[in-house]
Amino acid sequence: MNFIRPEVRAALARWREAMAGATVTALGLWWALTSLGLIRWAGVALILIGAALAWAGAQRARFRGGHGGLGVVHVDERQVIYLAPVGGGFASLDSLVQVEVAPDLAGLPVWRFTSPGEVLTIPLNAEGTDALFEALSALPGVDMQAAIRATAGKPDKPVVIWQAPRIKLH
């Protein structure tokens, strides 16, 4: 018997890392305030570790992953693979020029991974887009806050998440 509604269970699962970080922070705070000596310093260290875990968990939870959309996203060894009946493909993180969230022709938000001569378009609600969080974090200088804001709503114009640095020839 399940005593928790499925939507509440999904919300708890989405925020589980942030809640674990908050629990570690609370334990560290308790140790820091009620103990002496080495345990007090261990509590201070737990506060710092727990705060970092809570912040990272909140960022990951705010990054909206898709469910129920067309296709499946899989990330394997710096390759973003999109499997779909129409328009599937793959993009290597090493050859990317630009990553953006933009509206498609119907106005629905999509991920666009641009490589030289090729563009991989993935619907924002495709199954498995949660894996894009780790893939994008591997790119130097990625704007994760822009990604979180863009995935939270319906952008009316393209939002650039990452762009390859320009190489100056002179």
Image: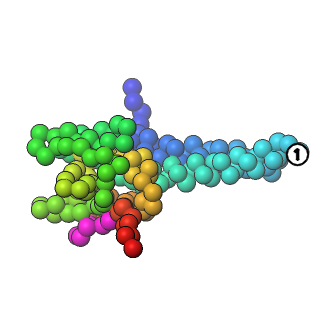
Q: Specify the farthest residue to the right.
A: 37
Q: Place residue 158 in its image quadrant.
A: bottom left
Residue in the image at 37% along x and 42% along y: 78
- Give how far across and how far down residue 40 sits, in percent: 82, 47
- Give how far across and how far down residue 94 sits, in percent: 35, 49
Apparent side of residue 48 relative to residue 121 in the rendered image (left or right): right
Residue in the image at 24% along x and 63% along y: 102
Label 1: few (<14), some or many (≥20) within 10 Å?
few
Magenta segment includes 13: no
Q: Is residue 34 visible?
A: yes
Apparent side of residue 140 relative to residue 166 in the rendered image (left or right): right
Colour style of the rendered protein structure: rainbow
Magenta segment includes 160: yes
Residue in the image at 31% along x and 54% along y: 96
Depth check: 10 or 164 in front? Answer: 164
Q: Specify the farthest residue to the top.
A: 1
Q: Which residue is mark 1?
A: 36
Residue 29 drawn above or below residue 167: above
Q: Amino acid at mark 1?
A: Leu
Q: Place residue 145 in its image quadrant.
A: bottom left
Residue in the image at 52% along x and 44% along y: 17
Label 1: which secondary element: loop
Depth check: 167 or 133 in front? Answer: 167
Q: Quadrant of the C terminus?
A: bottom left
Depth check: 158 or 41 in front? Answer: 158
Q: Which residues are magenta?
A: 155-161
Residue 111 drawn above or below residue 74: below
Depth check: 71 or 1 in front? Answer: 71
